[in-house]
């Protein structure tokens, strides 16, 4: 049972890590489309095609006037290969198809991990038995354990008797082989 519990804890830790990584990916690589209701329509979910896309420019600083955007980073004459990107800027959004594909993959991984957890829970001993049945089983196991402990103690006593008997035989052999040296 401890092995199953250890596996279950490991899976739960992995699931939490997957949740964190999934949220990190989704917040980092989405296309920054705002989820706002178009003007004139109240309390209705907007059609995705009517939601305006945000600019690929980084967001304006909080103290900047409304509508101001930060200027785009200067491009390197040799392209981005020289690593001139500002490390403070968020990475570029993934292409819609790539983003959707990765979303499906991340969702599939979460579902698979959740199914592993469900399986481990289903094989825990006593999961399908009532509290009374579990208490009865515990009492049976306690009785069995007491019987095993009594048997172990009897074996230890028998081992002590055999050890004393063997010491006596070895002592007799030693006296017979070497003779009585006390003379």
Image (tube, rainbow, N blue to C red):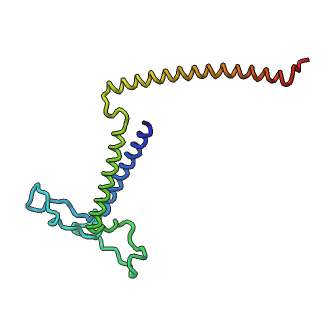
Query: Is the residue 103 above or below the residue 95 in the image?
Result: above
Q: Residue at x 73, y 22 (%)?
A: 167
Q: Residue furthest bottom?
A: 77
- Specify the farthest residue to the left: 40
The location of residue 139, given as percent across then percent down, is 40, 22
Indicate the position of residue 121 as horizontal and vertical percent values.
34, 40
Could you say which is closer to the camera, residue 134 or residue 19? 134
Q: Nearer the viewer, residue 173 or 153?
A: 173
User: Considering only vertical position in the picture, is 97 above or below 113?
Assistant: below
Quadrant in which residue 77 is drawn:
bottom left
* Residue ID at (22%, 66%): 66
In the image as oriented, which residue stretches furthest toward the right? 183
Quadrant in which the C terminus is drawn: top right
Q: In the figure, residue 55 lies in which quadrant? A: bottom left
Rendering quarter of residue 91: bottom left
Q: Nearer the viewer, residue 9 or 179?
A: 179
Q: How many marks?
A: 0
Q: On the rendered structure, is 114 left or right of 172?
A: left
Residue sitting at 8 percent across and 61 percent down?
40
Give the quadrant of the N terminus. Answer: top left
Residue 93 image offset from top left, x and y in percent: 30, 67
Determine whether 129 is above or below 65 in the image: above
169 relative position to 112: left or right: right
């Amino acid at each position: 049972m401890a092995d199953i519990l250890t596996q279950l804890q490991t899976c739960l830790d992995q699931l939490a890590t997957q949740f964190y990584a999934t949220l990190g990916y989704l917040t980092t690589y989405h296309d920054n489309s705002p989820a706002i209701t178009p003007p004139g329509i109240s309390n209705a979910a907007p059609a995705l095609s009517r939601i305006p896309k945000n600019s690929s420019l980084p967001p304006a600083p909080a103290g900047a006037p409304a509508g101001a955007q930060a200027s785009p980073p200067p491009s390197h004459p040799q392209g981005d290969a020289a690593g001139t990107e500002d490390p403070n800027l968020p990475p570029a959004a993934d292409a819609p198809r790539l983003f959707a594909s990765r979303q499906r993959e991340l969702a599939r991984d979460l579902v698979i991990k959740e199914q592993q957890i469900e399986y481990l829970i289903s094989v825990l001993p006593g999961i399908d038995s009532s509290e009374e049945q579990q208490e009865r089983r515990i009492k049976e196991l306690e009785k069995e354990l007491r019987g095993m402990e009594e048997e172990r103690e009897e074996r230890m006593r028998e081992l002590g008797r055999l050890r004393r008997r063997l010491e006596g035989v070895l002592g007799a052999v030693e006296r017979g082989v070497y003779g009585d040296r006390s003379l």
